[in-house]
Amino acid sequence: MRHDFSQAIKKQLCANVGGKCSNPNCRKATTWPDYTGTKSDSIGEAAHIYAASTEDGPRLNPQMSVDDIKHISNGIWLCSNCHTMVDRDVQRFPAELLKKWKHDAEYAQYCEISGSNVPNIVSPNDAKKEHLQSLRTSIEALHSLLNKSLDYYNQSLRRFGITLDAEIAERNILYHNNLEYIYTEFNDSKQKIGELLSKYSLEYGMELSSLINQYGEAIAFKTHSDCFGDIVDYWSGFFKVIDTSNELRQQLFQSILLVMQQVYLSIDSN
C-alpha cells in the first residue's frame, strides 16, 4: 500500500525550495500561473526519499513506519522528469544523495530569502559528476520530448501526410500550444547539450561525446524558406526525422546511458 504525503506537506516541500526542482543539475521552476491567471499549474511533485510503501518501491526501507514514510523529512520536491529519473535508477540516486539535494536546495532558498551567500565548495570529482549528471538530465529530457512528440504526431498529425504544414498553418489555433512547447523544449535542450559538450567534452570522453553527436545527427533536418524568408516546412521536416530515426534514436540513447554509467564509475576510480 502506498502512503502519500498530505497536501499540507506537499505545499510545504514546494515552498521550502521556492518552487524549484531540488536536483542541483536541474533547478527548474515547477509552478507558474495558468493563462487565465486565476490558478497555478505545476510540474512539481513531492517525491519520497525512501519508498512510499513498507513492502516495495524505490529505495525501500522496510524498517520505516507509516508515519515516518509520510513525514516531511522523507520528502523532496522535484520536477516530474527528475522524479521519474531518480526512481528508475536507485543505484545512481540513493537516499543519501537525495537527502543532500533536499538540504542544499532548502538552504539555497533560505540564503536567497535572507540575502546570504550560498557556499560553493565542490571537489573536482563531485564537479565532474555534476557535469555528467547535467548532461544526462538534458539528454533524457530531449529523448523524452522526442518520444512524446512522435506519439503526438502519430495520434494527431500523421494522417495529413504531405499537407501537414498546410493543415497546421490553416488551423494553427488547434496545434499552437503543443507545437510551441515542442519547439521551445527541443531547441532549448539541444542548446543546453551543445553548451555542456563544448565545456566538458574532455571530462565526458571521446566515446560518449561521439555517441551524443551521432544522436544529434540522427535528428537533424533541413527546412526551406519562401520568398519572404519564412520557414514553410519546419514541422514536416521535424516529424519526418523523428519518425524515420526512431529505432536508431532508441539504440543510441541506450548506448549513451550505458557509457555514461561507465564514465560515472570511472570518476571515483581515478
Image (spheres, rainbow, N blue to C red):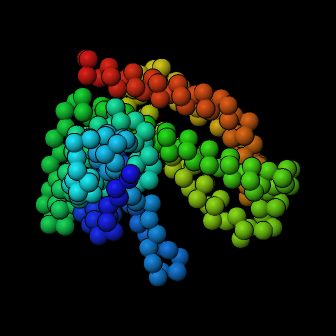
Tell me where residue 125 appears, x and y as whole percent.
24, 28
The correct choice, above or below, for 46 with respect to 24 in the image is: below
Tell me where residue 2 appears, x and y as whole percent.
38, 53
> Image point 45% across, 20% down: which residue?
206
Q: Is residue 173 left or right of residue 25?
A: right
The correct choice, above or below, for 267 with respect to 182 in the image is: above
> Image point 45% across, 23% down: which residue?
259
Tell me where residue 134 appears, x and y as whole percent.
38, 40
Dividing the picture into quadrants, the one containing residue 202 is top left
The correct choice, above or below, for 252 with respect to 81 in the image is: above
Q: Is residue 139 left or right of residue 223?
A: left
> Image point 68% across, 35% down: which residue?
246
Q: Is residue 18 visible?
A: no
Q: Nearer the viewer, residue 156 or 169?
A: 156
Q: Nearer the viewer, residue 115 or 36?
A: 36
Dividing the picture into quadrants, the one containing residue 21 is bottom left
Dividing the picture into quadrants, the one containing residue 59 is top left
Q: Is residue 92 left or right of residue 172?
A: left
Q: Quadrant of the C terminus?
A: top left
Q: How many marks?
A: 0
> In this view, which residue lies farthest toward the top?
270
Q: Is residue 76 visible?
A: yes
Tell me where residue 106 appears, x and y as whole percent.
21, 57
> Image point 42% across, 27% down: which residue?
260
